[in-house]
Image (tube, grey):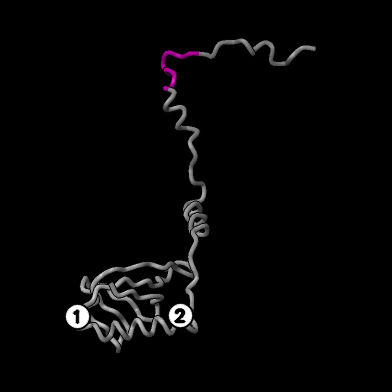
Amino acid sequence: MSDKYEKIRNMKRPQFAEFPPMPLRDRAAQFSPFAAVVGYGDAVMETARLTDEKVNLHGDAAFELDLDLARLREMIAEQPRVKVTYFVPDERKAGGKYVEKEGVVRRFDEVERVLVFKDGASISISEIRSVEIL
């Protein structure tokens, strides 16, 4: 049985003087992937990004946090150094993440319900999970 491509199978590739062969590096670039739908890859990555849920403290944990905050309020004139674990809500999706901040507390603002640090950072008391006075 004969192959219909038998005549051309062993032929050499045509070469033209006015069209020199393309370098291999440039040929490979023709086949590189491209983003057919702009932003789709970012959307997939955003969906895959994990967030934590905010834990609402109850019982003993809430009582311990209240005691730690009261102790901090009493020591505020001394500008104590603390380590605070608090929740930062995610800007794009439900949930967020827990972050630790270590620093010197300058002010306990009871009206705004925030801790203000010496470096200017402020943390909402409602987002705090734990306070450790160092």
The residue sitting at 51% across, 50% down in the picture is 37
The question of residue 31 being in magenta is answered with no
Q: Amino acid at mark 2?
A: Ala
The residues tagged by marks 2 and 1 sit, at their Cα atoms, a distance apart of 26 Å
Give SS at disc 1.
helix
Where in the figure is residue 113, as x and y percent of width and height?
Answer: 33, 85
Where in the figure is residue 22, as x and y percent of width and height?
Answer: 43, 22
Where in the figure is residue 121, as x and y percent of width and height?
Answer: 26, 72
Reading the image, the residue beneath label 2 is 61
The residue sitting at 29% across, 79% down in the picture is 115
Quadrant where the C terminus sits is bottom left
Q: Is residue 16 above or below residue 84?
A: above
The question of residue 17 being in magenta is answered with yes
- Tag 2 and tag 1, C-beta contact below 8 Å: no
Q: Is residue 34 above or below residue 84?
A: above
Q: Tag 2: Cα neighbours inside 10 Å, few (<14), some, or many (≥20)?
A: few
Quadrant where the N terminus sits is top right
Q: Amino acid at mark 1?
A: Glu
Give SS at disc 2.
helix
Q: Tag 1: Cα neighbours inside 10 Å, few (<14), some, or many (≥20)?
A: few
Q: Name the magenta segment's main secondary structure.
A: loop
Reading the image, the residue beneath label 1 is 78
* Left or right: 34, with 103 as reference point: right
The residue sitting at 23% across, 73% down in the picture is 104
Q: Which residues are magenta?
A: 15-23
The image shows a total of numbered marks equal to 2
Name the N-terminal-most of marks 2 and 1.
Answer: 2
